[in-house]
Image (cartoon, rainbow, N blue to C red):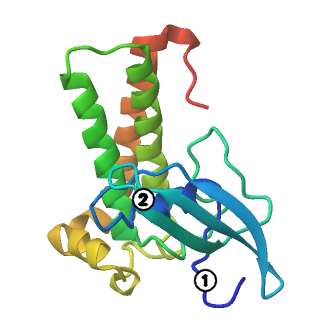
Amino acid sequence: MALGLPYVRTYNEAILFIRLRPCGCGETEAAWTAIVLTLDDAPARYFTGQCQNCGRAREFTLAMPEEAYPRADVVFGDGPGYSQVIDPGEWVSVSDQYGERVDELLSDGEFDAADVEVAQYALSARVSALDEVLKFLPHNGDVVPEWLFRSVNGRAVFEAAPARFGRDALLAERTALWENLERFLKDFYGDGGSSD
């Protein structure tokens, strides 16, 4: 790992990490270009982009696996290891924000094919974000340890609803989100729909 750089496990996690650190104007979106680097004999990426709102130049340098490239699935972290850059409270917040996006789309009244794709992605991302929270549970533990909530935002989410971070609560929420995704796929794609 490149010394002192935030370490992300996948390209998806890199983009999410960047979006969780918005521009000074508040905008989270930019068209990012990534350049592969080697720093301290370890693979890294240098991300540059212009804020879509104010045009300000933005940049991030992140340590990440050499094989981490954009992919179509909604997986933020391969394997059982938990995120080093996004804490469990932030993951719950991400899941909730994806849910809010789906609610906005469904309440719009003009739900077209593009909206279906966005909603499917968001519902899948909700499940994946909860999967990331579950990785913070100790092997034989029933709750996510409080010391793992290291960010201001993640800490606020934890303090607002600490009961959400118990094993049973997380598993129940994950099951509910998965069932919601399956219902959505069945409603819009019929039996031929797939969540893979």
Query: Would residue 166 be seen by someone viewing this image from the given angle?
Result: no
In the image: residue 143, left or right of residue 25: right
Q: How many marks?
A: 2
- Type of the residue with mark 1: Leu
Residue 33 position by quadrant: bottom right
Residue 123 percent coordinates (x, y)? 41, 36
Name the spot of residue 179 as percent of width and height, x first. 40, 32
Q: Is residue 76 shown left or right of residue 145? A: right
Reading the image, the residue beneath label 1 is 5
Question: Which mark identifies residue 81?
Answer: none
Quarter of the image where one finds residue 27: bottom left
Q: Residue at x 79, y 65 (%)?
A: 66
Q: Residue furthest left?
A: 160
Q: Residue at x 60, y 59 (%)?
A: 77
Q: Secondary structure at mark 1?
A: loop
Residue for point 49% across, 55% down:
131
- The kind of residue tagged 2 is Arg
Quadrant of the snapshot with the C terminus: top right
Q: Which mark, by number, is residue 19? A: 2
Residue located at (39% from left, 49% from top): 52
* Label 1–label 2 contact, CB within 8 A: no
State the residue lying farthest toward the right.
Answer: 41
